[in-house]
């Protein structure tokens, strides 16, 4: 079955530590997105990518980095500069070129600083 | 700049109607609507495109006013399964593609 998979579901990070969240899709989608969901603030865009080897900062990119070396993969690294103690991050993908198509979301990763 | 949704929360009795509004300060190519149940991933409901085309849910309707950069989601004869948080997403086009920006969400609770 086609879909978008995030791992792990839960992740714990020590202060000063960098961690990487995985996002993989087998939908052959060009566009991929990372969002952070905070209570009362909805889904805020961290980074997005329309094609391989290209990505753009979203509204809350500070403390995060990404790579897009393969079409199906868009990992997100949370660095020690990211001060939010807990965060629920969602990855999404869409066809990209056809803007009439919907985005598909992964199940999310909940990151906690310990 | 996120789209602004209103209301932030609404409580309905089963069978009642509701309207959720979404407004953007930027010109929109299209508006997306998603519903998220607690602990789950957002699920696609509907896309509204410039020019009036719509794609999506059979029992939920929506409108898109391109000039005002506003969209509204209409939930009629609500069912218990409609409970969740509704997000509107505004697609902003740039040179090499587009980015999908979401509003802060509207929490809908349908009671028996």
Image (cartoon, helix red, strand yellow):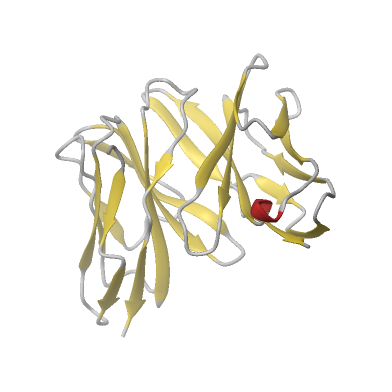
**Residue ranking furthest to the left:** A69
Residue drawn at 82 percent across, 49 percent down: B15
Q: Nearer the viewer, residue A24 or A56?
A: A24
**Residue ranking furthest to the top:** B51
User: To which quarter of the image does residue B57 belong?
Assistant: top right
**Residue ranking furthest to the front:** B112
Q: Image quadrant for the C terminus of chain A?
A: bottom left
Residue drawn at 72 percent across, 50 percent down: B79
Position in image of residue A6 (x %, y %)? 29, 55
Q: Image quadrant for the N terminus of chain A?
A: top left
**Residue ranking furthest to the bottom:** A114
In screen coordinates, is A45 left or right of A64? right
Q: Is residue A84 visible?
A: no
Position in image of residue A91 (x %, y %)? 36, 50
How many marks do you count on the picture?
A: 0
- Taking B82 as reference, is A25 above or below it? above
Q: Is residue A87 visible?
A: yes
Residue drawn at 42 percent across, 65 percent down: A88
Position in image of residue B30 (x %, y %)? 58, 27
User: To which quarter of the image does residue B10 belong?
Assistant: bottom right
In screen coordinates, is A46 left or right of A40? left
Position in image of residue A75 (x %, y %)? 23, 52
């Amino acid at each position: 079955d086609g879909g978008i998979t995030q791992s792990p579901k839960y992740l714990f990070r020590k202060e000063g530590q960098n961690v990487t969240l995985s996002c993989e899709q087998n939908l052959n989608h060009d566009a991929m997105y990372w969002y952070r969901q905070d209570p009362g603030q909805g889904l805020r865009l961290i980074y997005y990518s329309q094609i391989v080897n290209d990505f753009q900062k979203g509204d809350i990119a500070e403390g995060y980095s990404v790579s897009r070396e393969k079409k199906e993969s868009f990992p997100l690294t949370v660095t020690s500069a990211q001060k939010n103690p807990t965060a629920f991050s969602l990855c999404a993908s869409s066809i990209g070129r056809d803007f009439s198509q919907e985005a598909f979301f992964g199940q999310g990763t909940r990151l906690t600083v310990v | 700049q996120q789209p602004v949704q209103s209301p932030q929360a609404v409580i309905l009795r089963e069978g009642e109607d509701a309207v959720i509004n979404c407004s953007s300060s930027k010109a929109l190519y299209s508006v997306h609507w998603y519903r998220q149940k607690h602990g789950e991933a957002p699920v696609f409901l509907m896309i509204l495109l410039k020019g009036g085309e719509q794609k999506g849910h059979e029992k939920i309707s929506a409108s898109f006013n391109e000039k005002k950069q506003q969209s509204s989601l209409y939930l009629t004869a609500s069912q218990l399964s409609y409970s969740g948080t509704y997000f509107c997403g505004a697609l902003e086009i740039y040179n090499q593609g587009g980015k999908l920006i979401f509003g802060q969400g509207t929490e809908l609770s349908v009671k028996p």
